[in-house]
Image: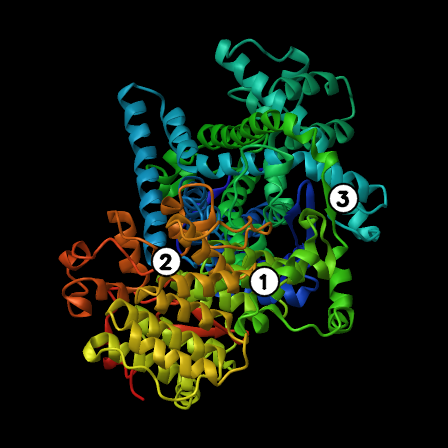
């Protein structure tokens, strides 16, 4: 076979490889990829050593829908570019080998190299970012999408790493290393983040994958696949299982070979029998032959006289040895996706990479898209690069253009991409992935011994789905927790939650777990403990798989606003059902707090007749200087009662407790006796403000006996106990309480009540929290709410706060499931921006 040349210019012979490569890539993407990604699963912890495994993609259409999401755009483009580039090289090579052309077309090869190189650089940068930049949703459940700042950070990291690779090349050049060593080492450094990431993911998940694939290969169900496999699934599992078994041995061979190569590069020299074989080509190192094991196999199989038998065996074995770990990256990139979705590296090993909270990954397509995006950008580029290198260099690179055959590329492209450099880079990248895998795999062995003790339940989601339609019948159509809390029936809500768990919270399954989680989430929401409510909302989303999840999504959005994390609130708002008035109210509050517009025409129409929005506008107008005026209309709805008690709280702050008490008593008289414990508690606190201590304490003690588990009453009893006016109530077994009741220093933990003012303002931390939580506290300063942006206003706040004020001072109020929810009122709120957007128009 003649040596190929680089054909300059354009010709019709170029069309074939480009057309076939494009069609093959399209067919692969349209038909193969969706089928391979069908059945993605995610595992998340529901108890001690107890995990549920849920299926994310049930059909090909589910996968295609996921792949078309905006979050996967970069991954899709990167994967298709790298795949097309590799196929262009393949078809150009076929063109040459079949005699259609005398070489490779320069435009086609250049185009293919660009298509491969760009995704490879993206792969390196994405992998580096995933390992250096802490992903959203790890320290705290988060639905944040990639922000411009985050994307800029990834870009900056990529550029910095590429500059580092060039710096390494300059150092090697100064040290007089050969061009082959210099260029291959530069490329190794440039692409090493993807190599390391791949080794970490496979090494940390190897034990769980081996266990699962072994059971499926035998025709049985596995912890992650609760159905008997079909023939295709069983065959794939056998292939994967075989690869997984040999991976540690191949990686160990690579490590030993590298150590021996460093010790003495000339330690292994082939016998004359091998050298005289017609197919043998001298390699610069035995690493290009699969290391020590490959060297030995070549020597062994050289005794086979028939070349037709010897050559295929040797070629196949050496290719497997060289590219075992990397081959899984291309042939089983879908297995990598399954690993990342399962998120089991924490239980099956150490040193893995976590991309997202597994609970969010179960419920939120945006997180699923982000993980798939990383899968394609982080590994497809690097794997395709290695595949292209293998096609070009494996065993015999004599088909590469040489010398004058390169034409105008002789002094540039061919000078860099020459035979020895490409072969050295190939085994370096392959060896890097194998060594990284081996190290993480070894670290993970100890943890993997406990894998058999963990229960993975892959049937619970299906069972729960079947029973979901019967839930009302099962639970006798009980009133929901949100309705109970809206009616101020905290005692019944807490008792029902306690009876549903009975100290066995870690053992709950099925619908019981969903109802218990939802109840606890709403109880924490009612207390303004938003960090805990948010975590429970994410748990609930995962358990429900995103179905019937409007309440959970409302809590997540409200949590972001209460935590003043407005950047996180935006993607969460996008997941709400805009036909729901509660979601529209939340959008309006988000618009007021952020100074941005999150309402469409239909939402504005719904809000124009919403009484709760009008109450909030009235509150904001009073905050902006009009002063508090108690409402004259009846307080029939839970949200009206909540905002009315907040008006009473503001009267307390301005020393108008007597007037407020008279007004409140008239409202209470219109209700059934005992129907509103919170209102009765506030009436007692107003008596306490005016010096009628005995009357107030007596009324509060009576309420405590009638409603011993009401958290607001219990919190006030603790305050009275601190004043020597009462005994502390018995501890609340469910811990559904104000942090004031805790035995630890509540002042340090009060920030968990994100929007509730603290019971005292005796230090700077508590004052800062008060300003961020509810700026109505400025009524305790000389300037009042008029100078809310000034730092001196915070400093002028007095230390003492009216007893129990935190139980009923609220800001912007919404409803979740009919239950009034306080989102506070930060001092830095920009009401001018709200007016500009027409948000305060009645």
Q: Pinpoint residue 249: horizontal percent, then vertical percent.
A: 67, 24
Q: Is residue 803 left or right of residue 223?
A: left
Residue 320 in sight here: yes
> How far is the residue under mark 3 from the one under mark 2?
38 Å
Where the N terminus falls, by quadrant? top right
In this orientation, which residue lies closer to the viewer: 579 or 535?
Answer: 535
Callout 1: SS: helix
Residue at 74% from the left image edge and 29% from the top image edge: 313
Is disc 1 surrounded by few (<14), some (14 to 19) or many (20+) residues within 10 Å? some
Which of discs 2 and 1 lies nearer the camera? The answer is: 2
On screen, residue 185 above or below 594: above
Residue 330 in the image, given as x and y percentages of width and height = 60, 45
Residue indicated by mark 2? 147
Identify residue for label 1: 26
Of 507 and 676, which appears nearest the observer? 676
The tag earlier along the polypeptide, 2 or 1, is 1
**Count of marks overlaid on the render:** 3
Q: Residues within 10 Å of mark 2 (few under 14, many from 20)?
A: few
Comparing 62 with 423, the one in front is: 62
Q: Which mark is residue 237?
A: 3
The colour scheme is rainbow
First-in-chain label (1 vs 3): 1
Secondary-structure class at tag 3? helix
Circle 3 crowding by C-alpha within 10 Å: few under 14, some 14–19, many from 20: many
| Mark 1 to mark 3 CA distance (whole Å) | 26 Å
Q: Which mark is residue 704?
A: none
């Amino acid at each position: 076979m003649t040596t190929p040349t680089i054909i300059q210019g354009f010709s019709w012979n170029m069309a074939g490889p480009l057309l076939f490569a494009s069609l093959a890539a399209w067919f692969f993407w349209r038909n193969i990829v969706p089928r391979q990604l069908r059945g993605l699963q995610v595992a998340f912890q529901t108890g001690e050593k107890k995990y549920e495994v849920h299926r994310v993609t049930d059909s090909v259409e589910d996968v295609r829908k996921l792949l078309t999401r905006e979050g996967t755009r970069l991954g899709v483009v990167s994967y298709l570019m790298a795949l097309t580039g590799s196929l262009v090289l393949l078809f150009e090579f076929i063109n040459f080998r079949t005699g259609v052309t005398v070489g490779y077309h320069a435009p086609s090869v250049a185009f293919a190299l660009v298509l491969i190189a760009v995704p490879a650089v993206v792969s390196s940068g994405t992998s580096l970012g995933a390992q250096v930049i802490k992903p959203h949703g790890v320290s705290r459940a988060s639905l944040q999408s990639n922000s411009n700042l985050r994307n800029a950070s990834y870009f900056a990291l990529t550029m910095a790493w590429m500059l580092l690779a060039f710096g390494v090349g300059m150092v090697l050049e100064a040290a007089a290393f050969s061009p082959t060593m210099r260029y291959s080492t530069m490329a190794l450094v440039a692409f090493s983040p993807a190599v390391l990431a791949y080794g970490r993911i496979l090494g940390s998940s190897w034990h769980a994958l081996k266990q699962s694939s072994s059971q499926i290969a035998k025709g049985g169900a596995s912890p992650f696949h609760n159905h008997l496999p079909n023939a295709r699934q069983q065959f794939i599992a056998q292939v994967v299982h075989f690869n997984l078994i040999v991976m540690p041995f191949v990686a160990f061979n690579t490590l030993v070979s590298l150590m021996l190569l460093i010790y003495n590069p000339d330690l292994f020299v082939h016998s004359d029998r091998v050298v005289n074989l017609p197919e043998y080509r001298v390699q610069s190192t035995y690493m290009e032959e699969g290391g020590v094991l490959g060297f030995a196999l070549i020597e062994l199989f050289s005794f086979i006289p028939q070349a037709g038998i010897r050559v295929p065996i040797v070629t196949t074995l050496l290719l497997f040895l060289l590219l075992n770990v990397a081959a899984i990256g291309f042939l089983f990139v879908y297995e990598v996706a399954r690993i990342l979705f399962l998120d089991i590296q924490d239980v099956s090993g150490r040193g893995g990479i976590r991309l997202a909270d597994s609970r969010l990954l179960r419920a939120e397509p945006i997180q699923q898209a982000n993980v798939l995006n990383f899968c394609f950008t982080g590994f497809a580029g690097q794997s395709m690069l290695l595949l292209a290198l293998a096609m070009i260099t494996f065993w015999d690179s004599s088909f590469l253009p040489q010398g004058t055959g390169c034409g105008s590329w002789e002094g540039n492209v061919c000078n860099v991409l020459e035979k020895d450099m490409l072969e050295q880079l190939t085994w370096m990248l392959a060896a890097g992935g194998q060594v990284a895998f081996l190290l993480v795999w070894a670290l993970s062995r100890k943890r993997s011994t406990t894998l058999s003790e963990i229960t993975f339940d892959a049937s619970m989601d299906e069972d729960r789905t079947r029973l979901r339609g019967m839930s009302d019948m099962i639970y006798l159509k009980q009133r929901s927790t949100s309705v109970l809390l809206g009616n101020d029936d905290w005692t019944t809500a807490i008792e029902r939650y306690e009876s549903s768990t009975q100290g066995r919270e870690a053992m709950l399954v099925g619908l019981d777990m969903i109802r218990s989680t939802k109840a606890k989430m709403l109880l924490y929401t009612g207390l303004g403990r938003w960090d805990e409510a948010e975590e429970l909302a994410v748990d609930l989303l995962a358990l429900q798989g995103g179905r019937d999840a409007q309440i959970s999504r409302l809590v997540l959005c409200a949590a972001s606003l209460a935590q003043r994390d407005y950047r996180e609130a935006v993607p969460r708002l996008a997941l709400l059902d805009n036909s729901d008035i509660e979601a529209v109210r939340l959008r309006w509050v988000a618009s007021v707090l952020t100074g941005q517009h999150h309402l469409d025409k239909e939402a504005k129409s719904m809000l124009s007749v919403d009484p709760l929005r009008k109450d909030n506008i009235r509150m904001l107008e009073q905050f902006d200087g009009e002063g508090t005026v108690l409402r004259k209309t009846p307080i029939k709805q839970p949200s009206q009662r909540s905002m009315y008690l907040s008006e009473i709280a503001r009267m307390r702050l301005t020393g108008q407790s007597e007037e407020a008490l008279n007004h409140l008593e008239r409202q209470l008289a219109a209700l059934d006796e005992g129907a509103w414990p919170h209102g009765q508690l506030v009436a007692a606190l107003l008596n306490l403000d005016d010096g009628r201590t005995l009357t107030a304490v007596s009324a509060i003690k009576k309420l405590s006996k009638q409603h011993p588990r009401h958290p607001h009453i219990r919190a006030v009893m603790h305050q009275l106990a601190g004043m020597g006016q009462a005994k502390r109530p018995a501890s609340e077994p469910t811990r559904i309480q104000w942090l004031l009741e805790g035995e630890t220093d509540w002042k340090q933990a009060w920030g968990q009540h994100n929007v509730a003012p603290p019971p005292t303002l005796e230090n700077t931390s508590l004052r800062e929290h008060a300003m961020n939580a509810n700026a109505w506290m400025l009524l305790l300063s000389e300037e009042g709410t008029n100078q809310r942006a000034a730092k001196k206003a915070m400093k002028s706040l007095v230390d003492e706060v009216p007893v129990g004020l935190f139980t009923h001072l609220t800001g912007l109020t919404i409803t979740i499931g009919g239950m009034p929810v306080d989102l506070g009122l930060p001092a830095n709120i920009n009401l001018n921006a709200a007016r500009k957007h027409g948000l305060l128009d009645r």
